[in-house]
Image (cartoon, rainbow, N blue to C red):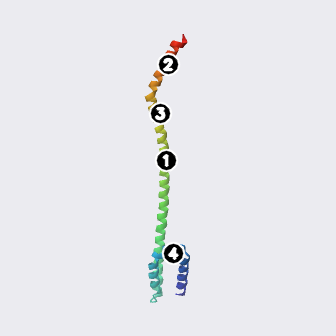
């Protein structure tokens, strides 16, 4: 019990010195319940078994959380690669759109430019060449 009190005091000092102690509030009922469970003096062997089971459960939860975090990292890498690929394709699309715009302008104004140039060339030869 002396060790438990020291642990409780240590926990309390961490909460008191924490910049945002309200983040620990949702753990308080769990901590109070665990303290009552382990203070029960009926059987110390039973408490040790219960403590071991709780530690195993916490360990499995932590492993699950770490696996989820690693999976998130992989998903973020995948999203990043998709984003860079999309950026490359949008640059290609922009270049293609510019090319199509120039082709459309050439088809629209090309015949007029060629025709006007031909007429000007004929007029030049007719009036200034001879």
Task: Please indicate whether residue 27 sits to the left or right of residue 6 in the image.
Answer: left
Tell me if residue 69 comes above or below residue 93 in the rendering: below
Spatial CA span between label 4 and label 3: 64 Å
Mark 3 or mark 1: whose residue is earlier in sequence: 1
Mark 1, residue position:
87
Furthest toward the bottom, the residue is 42
Whichever of labels 1 and 4 marks the residue nearer the N terminus, that label is 4
> Residue 102 shows which numbered tag?
3
Q: Looking at the image, which residue is at 47% across and 54% down?
A: 79
Eye-nearest disc, 2 or 3: 2
Marks 4/2: CA–CA distance: 87 Å
Which residue is labeled 2 in the image?
120
**Mark 4: which secondary structure?**
helix
Quadrant of the frame with the C terminus: top right
| Mark 2–mark 3 distance (CA, rounded to whole Å) | 25 Å
From the image, state whether disc 1 or disc 2 is nearer to you.
2
Mark 3 surroundings within 10 Å by alpha-carbon count, few (fewer than 14), some (14 through 19), many (20 or more): few
Instruction: State the separation of the CA atoms marked 3 and 1.
Output: 23 Å
Question: Which numbered dot is residue 10?
Answer: none
Whether tag 2 and tag 3 are in contact, CB under 8 A, the answer is no
If you read the primary sequence from the N terminus, does the residue marked by circle 4 or circle 3 appear first?
4
Mark 4: few, some, or many residues within 10 Å (few <14, many ≥20)? few
Q: Which residue is mark 4?
A: 21
Regarding mark 3 in the picture, which secondary structure is present there?
Answer: helix
In front: label 1 or label 4: 4
CB atoms at circles 1 and 2 under 8 Å apart? no
Q: Is residue 5 above or below residue 113?
A: below
Label 1 or label 2, whichever comes before in sequence order: 1
Mark 1 Cα shell of 10 Å, populated few (<14), some (14-19), many (≥20): few
Mark whose residue sits in front, 4 or 2 = 2
């Amino acid at each position: 019990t002396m060790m438990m009190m020291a642990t409780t005091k240590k926990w309390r000092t961490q909460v008191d010195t924490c910049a945002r102690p309200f983040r620990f509030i949702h753990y308080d009922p769990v901590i109070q319940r665990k303290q009552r469970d382990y203070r029960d003096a009926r059987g110390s062997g039973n408490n040790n078994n219960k403590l071991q089971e709780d530690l195993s459960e916490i360990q499995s939860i932590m492993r699950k959380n770490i696996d989820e975090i690693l999976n998130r990292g992989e998903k973020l890498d995948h999203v990043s690669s998709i984003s860079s690929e999309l950026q490359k394709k949008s640059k290609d699309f922009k270049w293609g759109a510019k090319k199509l715009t120039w082709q459309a302008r050439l088809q629209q104004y090309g015949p007029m430019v060629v025709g006007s140039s031909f007429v000007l060339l004929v007029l030049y030869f007719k009036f200034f060449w001879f």
